[in-house]
Amino acid sequence: MNSTATTTPVLEVRGLTKRFGGLTAVKNLSFDVHGGEIFGLIGPNGSGKSTAMKAIMGIERPTAGTVRFEGHDVAGQPAHKIARQGFGMVFQHSRPLNRQTVLENIMVALLPDSLFMLFPDKALTERAKWIADRVGLGSVMHRRPPTLPFADLRRLELAKAIARDPKVVLVDEPFAGLTLAEVATFSELIRSFRDEGRAVMLVDHNVKSVAALVDRVLAMYLGEEIVTGRADEVMRNETVRRVYLGGAIETSARPESNFADKVPLLQVENISVHYGKAQALENVSIHVHQGEFVSVVGLNGAGKTTLFNTISGFLPYSGEIIRGGEKLRGISPAHIAKSGIVQCPETRELFGEMTVRENLDLGGQHLEPAEQAKQLEWLFELFPILKQRQGQMAQTLSGGEQQMLAIGRSLMMKPKILILDEPTLGLAPVILEQLSKALEKLRQTTPITVLLGEQNVTFALPHADRVYVLEHARIVWEGDPGRFAAEAGEGYL
Amino acid sequence: MIGFFKSRLFWISLTIVIVASTLPWYVSGYILGLLTVAYYFGVFAMAWDLLFGFAGEVNFGPTFLIGVGAYTAGIINNQFGISVSMCIVIGALASVVAGFVLALPALRVRGPYFGLTTLVAVLILQNFIVVFADLTGGEIGLTIPDVLSIDAGVNYWIALGFMTISAAILYGLSQSPVGLVLQASGQDPVQAGALGFNIVKHKLAAFIVSAFFSGLSGALLVFYFGTASVGTVVDIAVGVQVIVAAVLGGRRTVLGAALGAIFLIVAGEFLRPTGELATFIVSAVALVVILFFPGGFLGSVLSREARQ
Ligand SMILES: Nc1ncnc2c1ncn2[C@@H]1O[C@H](COP(=O)(O)OP(=O)(O)OP(=O)(O)O)[C@@H](O)[C@H]1O
Ligand SMILES: [Mg+2]
């Protein structure tokens, strides 16, 4: 904790409320954030964390309440005005300018809001370079965003948010999708923002990292504050445990010998995939038995999504993919999906302007009406929030709610082989527990086969009968989850 | 910006313009006339690309801006006999005013509504022209007493010069800091707002610039034709051609839009002997390019260069 934290707060939020139609996403929220302090916001999916940040930033107009910045109220002002007074925000999803270099992208953030700036300023370039170095983009600043790894794209977002030296920095889920090592670097960066005297607000579902980073944390549920305080106190709170943290995820692997009598249901043999000159998969072979749960563990960019997209028929490849003795080559993605290999993509691919219910019905459209109704009921039991939100447009759902909907839609298709690509991205611990139980129940009650791609091994291991490790386009390890920690766990645990 | 003068693109463009400016000495008046029209279309397409490619707003009614400029210039020349150059300037300004009035409310609504508003504007203009036939010449068209020049070569040079200057300004603008902010607002308006940019202001400015060049080019075009008619400067089909030209040439490239327009006009004319087939062939080519080279002519070239 920092000594400046005792002076007057930079940000004073009082009675902040945001309603969307009949839904109160944020309800009467009050808190202070001091300069040189990291203030965390935690809560289950859809509890209003992102909405609270957006309301402070002026992206959503608060329904009621005040947001005092250095003593004067900024609530209700448009985002660009609030930003110019000293606010910066890091978004959950980034869309950089792809034709411009990293440096130019940072420079955009430094430009004045003027229509008459026709020539770039030399000083701006220098400042942009300095910022690039500051967030660790120094060596790639002349590259274009599409060629960068995921973590560097996130760095670019941090760079833009702090470019104009804001006094308040709002960071929404900075750790989502990052590796353990990257989370450590990002924590360090965020800590350095605090040490420069900024007031930092942080939202993330990576409880361990948040707890280690924040000075104080506010836990919320259904838009309201449950408790505010030091991280360890808040995490011990009974309500927080119940609605957010949930219980531990249980392990239950079955040895491969259980399945060994059968020919594998899915065989991927020696496949290689290229994107232009870059090799995305190199002689990858995996197999999955009927009813087996297999996890493919790998860091960002290792090739998991490429592997799944290849199985789903989206990419050209060399080698063979065989399902139940039949080669999949030449079969269209639509047919592969219809035949029961259903992928829930990392990018979610929801129909944003359709409602939750319409998205789900699309998934279940080939089922008999009675069967569809039953499946839907089962799904609503699994993700109760989707039941409440049936009429809401998918694009207005919170990050985690969208993830649940994506998983839900693929389950509505009653898949024979379900491919889940990073399903845990953006999900609260309590939902992970629910999802985990659901998978366990699926495993026990249905013949479903699951192929799970994860970076988060604490989720991937408990559900796996067998694990593959994918690294730099190659399978480097295969074995049962019990041996993973000792033999391949480095960099993941 | 400085880099541009050293880039291949600059030298290629310069060479093309120099070669093009020598054409009047050795090609027929017929071809010159064709290219003259093509160059004015080139400006329409570039102005449109500034809005779509950079600000991310689809203007389905480029002919609203073009038509207002063209008809205003034509009518005041017809009614009051004001000099050609004055008429052209007033036409362009009328376009700016009309664009402003249209864009101010339209830019506040998100999603496809902006596009729909612009489409409706074209229909209103078209109706206005038919209803006030006394003033506008109605469906027969408006006869304009003055012309730019009676010499095909001079007309050609005016068009080429105008297109070149417009291209330089629009391209320069697209690559300037203001162009970057515009692109950022088009790409992700929420984030651009959170970075401190007033998105409505920037898009409005882009719309006004687009309106100015569309109107100016429209006014020049009617003084070249000596007549203004719905079929040549207002009809939805003309607007579609402008849009196809810009997409064909390459979204977000500005210069590509001019190439696309020249290609469309020239190809359409050369295929004229095939009769009804001409439109079909040109449309088919356009469709193939859009489907298989979504970057358009210039977009594909530029992205290949960027990768190297
Ligand atoms: N534009 C909108 N219209 C209707 N409801 C909305 C809108 N935006 C958000 N919501 C709802 O408000 C609630 C709060 O959403 P918010 O994004 O703040 O959640 P969150 O706490 O950030 O969740 P997550 O951890 O999943 O990101 C959600 O239930 C969401 O569905
Ligand atoms: Mg959120």
Image (cartoon, coloured by chain):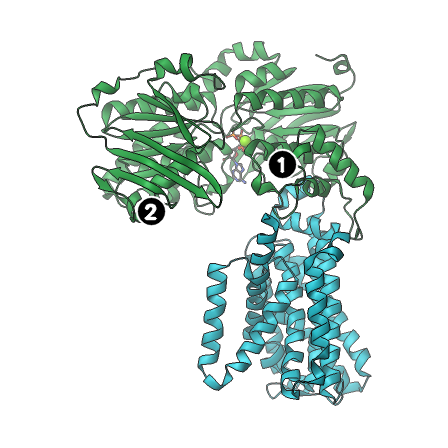
At 31% from the left and 15% from the top, the residue drawn is A252
User: B193 above or below A196?
Assistant: below
Residue A174: name its quadrant: top right
Q: Amino acid at mark 1?
A: Thr
Q: Is residue B307 left or right of residue A111?
A: left
From the viewer's side, name the closer residue of A187 and B81. A187
Q: Are marks 1 and 2 in contact (CB under 8 Å)?
A: no
Which one of the lettered chains is coloured green? A
Q: Earlier in the sequence, mark 1 or mark 2?
A: 1
What's under tag 2, amino acid-wise? Pro
Tell me if residue B72 can be seen: no
Q: Chain of mark 1?
A: A
Q: B120 or B27, which lies in front?
A: B27
Question: Residue A226, how many percent across, how many down?
Answer: 55, 18
For image coordinates 76% across by 31% down, the residue present is A165
Label 1 CB, ligand 1: below 8 Å? no
Q: Residues within 10 Å of mark 1 (few under 14, many from 20)?
A: some
Q: Position of residue A215 (x, y in %)?
A: 66, 15
Q: Position of residue A20 (x, y in %)?
A: 55, 38
Chain that bears disc 2: A
Q: Is residue B3 above or below residue A247?
A: below
Q: Is residue A240 left or right of residue A66?
A: left
Which residue lies under the disc numbered 1? A63
- Residue that mark 2 sits on: A333
Residue B270 position within the rendered picture, expressed as x and y whole percent measured from the top left: 53, 81
Vertical relation: A125 (above or below) A384: below
